[in-house]
Image (cartoon, rainbow, N blue to C red):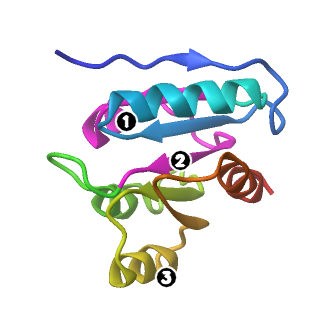
Amino acid sequence: MKARSVRTGRAGGAAAGRVYVVDDDESVRRGLARLLGVSGYGCEVFASAAEYLAAPVAAGAVGCLILDIRMPEMTGVELQRRVSGLAHDLPIIFLTGHADIPTCVETLKAGAVSFLTKPFEPGELMAAVEEAFA
């Protein structure tokens, strides 16, 4: 069963930018969409890296990506490499339950804005999102 993108939020969050969430855990996607929506951010959720890559994201889009590290088929780190340099090269926040120092260093050196671990504090995530939109 293919997961579908869910659009949430109201216009105006970070100049109407969108947060794109890529995580294979449905409860995480739902929770993040809810948190971002009540914080005024538009949000689209994707169950896999392939689903995100197939989505039409406009060149020059204003937004950021929240990526899980461990996902089937393509990891968040692999997705980071794939989107680097694309016309919609968005700032990336990693949010994972499988953190290790080498992966954290790799993602930050490759340009990630932040690397957070699950469970996370909502304020910490929202601060990272605000930094990504800055």
Query: What amino acid type should be assigned to the residue bearing mark 1?
Result: Tyr
Quarter of the rendering occupied by the C terminus? bottom right
Residue linked to disc 2: 65
Label whose residue precedes the other's in the sequence (2 or 1): 1
For this rendering, which residue is in front, 117 or 4? Answer: 117
- The answer for how far apart the CA atoms under marks 2 and 3 are is 16 Å
Query: What amino acid type should be assigned to the residue bearing mark 2?
Result: Leu
For the point 47% across and 76% down, the residue is 110
Residue 80 on the magenta segment: no
Residue linked to disc 1: 52
Residue linked to disc 3: 109
Magenta range is: 43-68
Residue 62 on the magenta segment: yes
Query: What amino acid type should be assigned to the residue bearing mark 3?
Result: Lys
Quarter of the rendering occupied by the N terminus? top left
Mark 3 crowd level (few <14, some 14–19, many ≥20, 10 Å Cα)? few
| Image coords of residue 23 (percent x, y) | 36, 40
Looking at the image, residue 60 sits to the left or right of residue 30; the answer is right
For the point 77% across and 52% down, the residue is 130
